[in-house]
Structure formats: structure tokens, C-alpha cells
Image (spheres, grey):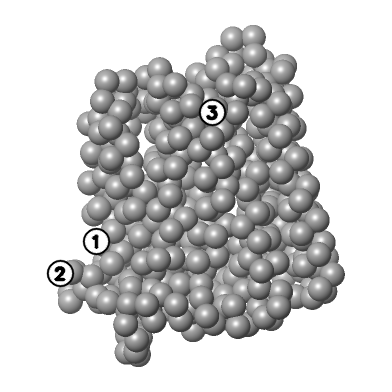
């Protein structure tokens, strides 16, 4: 008699692994909750600037100003400053009802929804200050939501469950990103930007429901120390564990995604300048790009255990930076009033695949650097450090393009990766190819 696994064409180990991944979604409310919370995390960031840049181009805001507005995401780079306090103190009103972690999640989501509504009722063509103010508020609220959801995920499940929790959180995040990217662009073409942003505010509801239904982690033990001590303790611990390699490792984290941040600031303005519609951009970067990004994610997950952490980091920074040459090619050959659709799709796909691969590699590396007792604060610190330099440089991208044009701008962002790759080689030589310094 045939083996059932053979009859279905699926080897038994594959079926077992699939069941181990899918079954907890229906049997463990922590896993179902993290999917909804990950979805909520994926909504705000693109709407602070990246998706919004298409609105700004339509409103005829100058490119130099659009580039400067990338600084509105600054809260995502500075969230480590208030992350320790979200670990230590209860949220107003909701903290007593829901507990510290879930209380802050619900409060942050309310603030995100209000900020999205504020942006929706703006008019960047005639009153840019309104859009800037509410976009900045959206960035602060979204960054706070990231911190508190990451803190909940790390503390609600034991270490052996974290890989599963992170996987479902990432799936939720990518779906939320798809809604905030493709969904908002499609809605803007059909009904206008106000409706698009108001719909994004409504889409936070699954995340709020997930927070209400999620279990609250056990309360953390009381912490000692005042304002300065609360902020400094996670930093001091990280520097002590990294030891002599601290400067090099932190510089590597800071520079790793710098080319991507600078490039991304002007990607949508390039697409709009070449004549592609919001629907074209949504189809290629979000719908097509969603599956491309999953491919990069799975490839990174398969490669890291086989070739080691530092070798993966080196490959990640090289391919991610080199992929910007595809955007340079698009700038030279992808115009024709938006008619060169497949040139657009292939070049953007190359860049998206490389970006997803490099992102997973860096997330894995930063996760290894964080200590369990300071996981939320140190992870917030490392992600802030990763994003800050690139986002600051991105603010000047519009001025650079006005002098060089899009093509040479993307060639330049590719070259930024050269010193980062050399730094990666230096760090790998000091502590070996397999392990992070904190391991």
C-alpha cells in the first residue's frame, strides 16, 4: 500500500514541517495575535514618506523638498531613546486594563490612526506644513508601535518559540506593507489620496483586535535607576559584550543599509518621472514585488546556516548595493512615457530581491547581537543605528539628482556599498565567519 505522503507527492518531513508551522496559527493565540500585530506594523512606515512621495510628486512639490521630507521617518531611527521607558512604565488608562505591553500597543495604534486621518485631510499642494506635521506625528506613533509590538513578541513566548513568532510576524508585516503600498496607490488612483489614507487608518483594526485578544506577558521585575540609567543600561551592556570590536561592528550595522535608504528615497520619484502610473508602480513594486521579496527572504534563510553569518553579510551588502545599477539602467532606458513596462518590472525586481535578501541577513545579525534581558531596547537601538545615517543622507538626494540626474545618482548609491563591504571583511577577519561577537 502506498505511503500517504508519497500519494500526495509530499515527503513526510516536508509535511511535518508544514504542519509544525501552520498548526500553531490555529492552536496558539500568541501566534495568531502576532500575525495581526505584524500586519499593523507593516502599515505606517510607507505612509510616512515612501508611498506619500507619489502624492507629493502629483502635487508638484519640488524634488529637493521631497528628498528633505524623507527625514520625516526620523522617529524610526530615534525610537531607542524612548524604548526603555515603554518597557518600564504602563500606558495611560489602557495599561491598567490590558497590562503594560498590550496597553501600549492599543495606545500607539490609536495614535497611528489619528495621524493617518490628519494626513488624509491635508493638501500638500497648498499647505505643505500640515502634511509635514501630521506625517511627523505618524512617524512617532508608528515607531512607538514597532517598539511595543517587538517587546510583546519577545516577552510573550519562550526562546524556542521565537523563530515561529518572528516568521508569522514577518508574514503579517509584508501583507501590511502590501496594503500600505499597492493598496494605497490603487485607492489613490481610483478615489483620491484622502480616501486612501482614511482606509489605511481603518485597516489598523485587525491589529487592535489582535492586541485585545492576545495574552499579556508576565510583568517584568521592577527596574532601578532614573531617567539616564534607564536609557544607558542597554547601551552599556551591548558595548561591554562587543568589547574591542564595538566600533567596527556598530559602524557595519550603521552602514549596511545606507545605500538602500539613500536609493529608496528617490525610487518612486524616478518611476513617476519616467511616466509610470500609480497602478504600474503598485503592480511592480508591491504585488510582483511581494513575491520577489519572499524569494529573497527564503534564500537568505537557507544560505545563512550554510555559509555563515559574516559571509552572508558580505554577500548581502555587495548584491544590495550592486542592484542599484539596475535602477540606473532603468533611468537610462526605461522611459518612453511609461511604455517600457517589462524593463521597469525586471530592474525593480532585481533591486527588490537583493534588498529583501540583505534585510533578512542584517535582521539575523542584529538579533544575534542583542542580549535576552535587553532584547527590545537593544534591538531598537541597533535598528535605529542601521537607519539613521542612510535616512540623513537621503534628505539630500533631491539636491544631488538636480545636479547629476537619476542615472548617475543610482550609480553613486551603488558605490556607497564598497567601503561597507571592506568593513564587513575587517569584522569577519577579527571574529571569524560563523558567529557574531556577542555569541
Residue 107, disc: 1
Q: Is residue 158 left or right of residue 245?
A: left
The one nearer the camera, 146 or 208, is: 146
Residue 398, disc: 3
Kindly identify the residue that appears in the image at 55 percent across and 17 percent down. Answer: 273
Q: Is tag 1's residue or tag 2's residue first in the polypeptide sequence?
A: 2
Q: Secondary structure at mark 2?
A: loop
Q: Is residue 425 left or right of residue 195?
A: right
User: Is disc 3 surrounded by few (<14), some (14 to 19) or many (20+) residues within 10 Å?
Assistant: many
Q: Is residue 15 visible?
A: no
Q: Do callouts 1 and 2 mark residues in contact (Cβ within 8 Å)?
A: yes
Give x and y (percent) for residue 227. 32, 77
Residue to which mark 2 is pinned:
93
Front position among marks 2 and 3: 3
Q: Secondary structure at mark 3?
A: helix
Q: Is tag 1's residue or tag 3's residue first in the polypeptide sequence?
A: 1
Give x and y (percent) for residue 86. 33, 71
Q: Quadrant of the C terminus?
A: bottom right
Give x and y (percent) for residue 195. 28, 30
Kindly identify the residue that appears in the image at 71 percent across and 74 percent down. Answer: 245
Kindly identify the residue that appears in the image at 55 percent across and 65 percent down. Answer: 382
Q: Is residue 85 left or right of residue 341?
A: left
User: Is disc 1 surrounded by few (<14), some (14 to 19) or many (20+) residues within 10 Å?
Assistant: some
The one nearer the camera, 13 or 227, is: 227
Amino acid at each position: 500500500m502506498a505511503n500517504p505522503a508519497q500519494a500526495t507527492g509530499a515527503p513526510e518531513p516536508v509535511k511535518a514541517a508544514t504542519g509544525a508551522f501552520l498548526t500553531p496559527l490555529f492552536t496558539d493565540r500568541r501566534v495568531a495575535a502576532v500575525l495581526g500585530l505584524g500586519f499593523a506594523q507593516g502599515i505606517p512606515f510607507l505612509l510616512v514618506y515612501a508611498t506619500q512621495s507619489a502624492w507629493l510628486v502629483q502635487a508638484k512639490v519640488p524634488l529637493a523638498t521631497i528628498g528633505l521630507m524623507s527625514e520625516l521617518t526620523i522617529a524610526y531611527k530615534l525610537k531607542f531613546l524612548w524604548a526603555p521607558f515603554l518597557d518600564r512604565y504602563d500606558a495611560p488608562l489602557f495599561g491598567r486594563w490590558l497590562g503594560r505591553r498590550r496597553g501600549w500597543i492599543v495606545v500607539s495604534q490609536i495614535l497611528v490612526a489619528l495621524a493617518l486621518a490628519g494626513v488624509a485631510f491635508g493638501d500638500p499642494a497648498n499647505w505643505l506644513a500640515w502634511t509635514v506635521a501630521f506625517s511627523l506625528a505618524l512617524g512617532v506613533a508608528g515607531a512607538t508601535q514597532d517598539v511595543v509590538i517587538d517587546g510583546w513578541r519577545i516577552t510573550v513566548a519562550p526562546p524556542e518559540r521565537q523563530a515561529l513568532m518572528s516568521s508569522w510576524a514577518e508574514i503579517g508585516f509584508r501583507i501590511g506593507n502590501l496594503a500600505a503600498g499597492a493598496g494605497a496607490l490603487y485607492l489613490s488612483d481610483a478615489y483620491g489620496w484622502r480616501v486612501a489614507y482614511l482606509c489605511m487608518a481603518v485597516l489598523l483594526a485587525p491589529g487592535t483586535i489582535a492586541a485585545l485578544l492576545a495574552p499579556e506577558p508576565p510583568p517584568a521585575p521592577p527596574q532601578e535607576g532614573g531617567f539616564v540609567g534607564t536609557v544607558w543600561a542597554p547601551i552599556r551592556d551591548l558595548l561591554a559584550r562587543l568589547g574591542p570590536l564595538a566600533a567596527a561592528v556598530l559602524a557595519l550595522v550603521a552602514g549596511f543599509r545606507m545605500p538602500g535608504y539613500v536609493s529608496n528615497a528617490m525610487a518612486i520619484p524616478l518611476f513617476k518621472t519616467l511616466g509610470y502610473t500609480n497602478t504600474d508602480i503598485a503592480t511592480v513594486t508591491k504585488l510582483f514585488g511581494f513575491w520577489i521579496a519572499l524569494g529573497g527572504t527564503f534564500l537568505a534563510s537557507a544560505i545563512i546556516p550554510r555559509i555563515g553569518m559574516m559571509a552572508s553579510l558580505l554577500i548581502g551588502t555587495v548584491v544590495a548595493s550592486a542592484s542599484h545599477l539596475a535602477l540606473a539602467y532603468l533611468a537610462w532606458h526605461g522611459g518612453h512615457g511609461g511604455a517600457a513596462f517589462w524593463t521597469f518590472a525586471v530592474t525593480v525586481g532585481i533591486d527588490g530581491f537583493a534588498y529583501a535578501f540583505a534585510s533578512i541577513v542584517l535582521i539575523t545579525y542584529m538579533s544575534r547581537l542583542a542580549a535576552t534581558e535587553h532584547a527590545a531596547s537593544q534591538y531598537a537601538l541597533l535598528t535605529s543605528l542601521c537607519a539613521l545615517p542612510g535616512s540623513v543622507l537621503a534628505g539630500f538626494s533631491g539636491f544631488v539628482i538636480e545636479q547629476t540626474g537619476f542615472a548617475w545618482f543610482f550609480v553613486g548609491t551603488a558605490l556607497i556599498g564598497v567601503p561597507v563591504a571592506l568593513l564587513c571583511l575587517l569584522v569577519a577577519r577579527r571574529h571569524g565567519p560563523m558567529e557574531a561577537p556577542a555569541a
